[in-house]
Amino acid sequence: MRAILFQGKGQVAVGEVPKPTLKDPGDVLVRITLAAICGSDLHIYHGAIPMLPGSSLGHEFVGVVEAVGEGVQSLKPGDRVVGPFHVACGACRACRRGEFNLCEKRGVYGYGPLMGNLPGAQAEWLLVPYGDVNLRKLPEKLSEERAIFAGDILSTAFGGLVQGGLRPGERVAVIGAGPVGLMAVESALALGASKVLVLDRVKDRLEMAEAIGAIPIHVERENPKRRVLEETQDEGADLVVEAVGGEATVALAFELVRPGGRISALGVTTTTTFPFPLNSALVRDLTFRIGLANVHHYIDQVLALLEADRLKPERVISHVLPLEEAPRGYELFDRKEARKVLLKVG
């Protein structure tokens, strides 16, 4: 079958790999119809995440069930499905607590040996373990272009806001207007934020954030801290969402949050240490949270909002390419010439 394969730093290609087959009773074989390139895929593309050449990539997908193992209860061939980007067993202590992102058997599709060495979803077929846990049947009228966001970046942003304690009427600052940041705008407004401020340096992304309903702040053309204070009656944001992943942007989050406020860090990072402003956080009574997204915990809520037309993430899509043009999609996304790239497979 065709799949997008890592070739080395800055290089991906379409190649042939064996089609997967059912192995365990809980397995589900999914024929992929639509995949996507995620910002975290670029960490692999840049060589920051260990990956063997020839490994398949991708973790955002929707598709159709082709076959199920004898132990699968909730799905049957022909069902349209979406799945979280990470897998969970549903039975370990962490899963029983609802902490699926901490599953003892967790892994991320197409993310190399550090994350379970699972095959990627930018391919014609994907074998999903523990299918009853790791797949959701799509509502009949929900489009694939909208549903695919539930499996990763939309549920990531939505969950980050909920875990950040967002209350109706509060003011939110989002650092980064990439795909996750734009999903944070969508989610914050749906959850009742009175004002959403978005910081970035890419004009096209800021324009999209404004179209969704945010106030754009170009960090290279104005002082972001001063502007946030102006927009929040000199207090700062009640909740700051860090959607980039890096020392400088996390440090900026501490500058933008009001005393007594919260910071929710969502950006995937390869940074290993950060000089935490311990004294300032203590005096200002700040709450800081960070963690891998618990998509399983939020995906059903997100799918319900998508079906009800309360969230419209598909408007951030800038390119829809055939699977064969995935290398071009990676290049466009890496150069920030694309907001979100989808790959038509089936």
Image: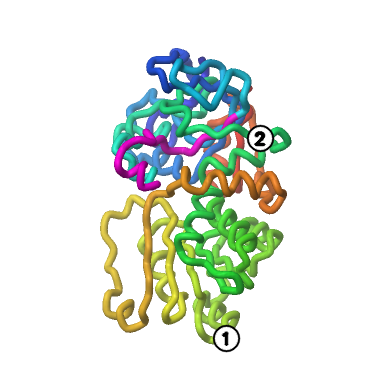
Pointer 2: what residue?
A: 144
Q: Up-down: is 224 above or below 177? A: below
Q: How far, Cα to Cα, is label 2 from label 1?
A: 41 Å
Residue at coordinates 50% horizontally, 18% vertically from top-left?
Answer: 68
Q: Which mark is residue 233?
A: 1
Residue at coordinates 32% horizontally, 80% vertically from top-left?
Answer: 280
Tell which of 33 and 6 is nearer to you: 33
Q: Up-down: is 85 above or below 308? A: above
Q: Determine if residue 164 is in view.
A: yes
- Three-letter residue code for mark 2: Glu
> From the viewer's perspective, is 158 left or right of 215?
left
Q: Which residues are magenta?
A: 81-98
At label 1, counting other C-alpha atoms closer than 10 Å, the crowd grade (few under 14, some 14-19, many 20 or more) is few
Q: Which mark is residue 141?
A: none
Quarter in which the C terminus is drawn: top right
Residue 117 point in image, percent of width and height: 34, 29
At label 2, counting other C-alpha atoms closer than 10 Å, the crowd grade (few under 14, some 14-19, many 20 or more) is some
The secondary structure type at the circle numbered 2 is helix
In the rendered image, which quarter is residue 103 located in?
A: top left
> From the viewer's perspective, is 123 left or right of 280?
right
> From the viewer's perspective, is 47 left or right of 228?
left
